[in-house]
Image: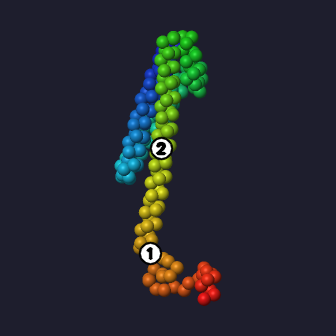
Amino acid sequence: MNDTLLKFKEVVDEEIHAYETLGELYKVKQSVLVQGKSDALWDIDAQIIKKSDNIKELNKKRKEISKYLGDENLTISEIIEQAKAANDSIADKLESQKTKLRVLANSLILQESTNMTLVQHGLTMVGKTLDIIVGALLPHSRQYNKLGQNVSCDNSLVSSVIEEA
């Protein structure tokens, strides 16, 4: 059982390292979003997807090892309880890993939320910029069309003061 617990601990260590790397990629993505470098965004997103696939593989590996401990869907808390019965030092290491994973998860959630807000802000700014460009190229008003010719006014928009005059 100690060997299985050690293998589980090693896989969780790999997962922690992968999550830390993912966090660094999210920081780079945030910097790219703030700077507005859309070309670099493709590369960062590709690296994030690759790292996410790696994390999925590690999760499968962890579930395979968990089968030998009773069930592939065991939580880390349940495995810690099993480890306390077998080896206290491994249980302590797993407990610290659990805490580290919780902190990393909260950090990644915050970073992803920040990045989504930056993307939304970027899209809003692009929309406003396009409105300005289109407005400059195709000026439309109630008095002139895009050719600069006078257009008839809609009398329903005229105030009562002008109508009486």
Instruction: Give left or right: position of 107 versus 39.
Output: right
Percent from the top left, x then y, of residue 157? 60, 79
Q: Which residue appears at 41% of the width and 73% of the height? A: 137
Residue displayed at 40% across by 49% down:
33
Residue type, mark 2 in image: Thr
Quadrant containing the C terminus is bottom right
Q: Is residue 94 above or below residue 16?
A: above
Label disc, if present, on residue 114 of the rendered structure: 2
Tell me how many marks there are: 2
Q: Residue 28 in the image: x percent, y percent?
A: 38, 42
| In this view, 25 is above or below 151 | above
Q: Is residue 4 visible in this depiction of the protein?
A: no
Under circle 2, the secondary element is helix
In percent of the image, x 57 and y 15: which residue is there? 82
Residue 8 x, y percent position in the rendering:
49, 21
Query: What residue sits 48% from the left and 42% below the top?
Result: 112
Seen in the picture, residue 7 relative to 156 is either above or below; the reply is above
> What residue would you read off at disc 1?
138
The amino acid type, in three-letter code, at marker 1 is: Leu
Note whether 151 is above or below 7 in the view shown.
below
Instruction: Give the crowd class for mark 2: few <14, some 14-19, many >=20 residues within 10 Å.
Output: some
Q: CA distance from mark 2 to mark 1?
A: 36 Å
Q: Position of residue 118 (x, y in %)?
A: 46, 49
Classify residue 1 as left or right of residue 23: right
Quadrant of the image occupied by residue 63? top right
Circle 1 packing at 10 Å, graded few (<14), some (14-19), many (20+), is few
Sequence-wise first label, 2 or 1: 2
Disc 1 on helix, strand or loop? loop
In this view, the residue in front, 157 or 70, is 157
Q: Kindly check if marks 2 and 1 are in contact, taking CB atoms under 8 A apart as contact.
A: no
Looking at the image, can residue 96 be seen? yes
Is 132 in front, or is 9? 132
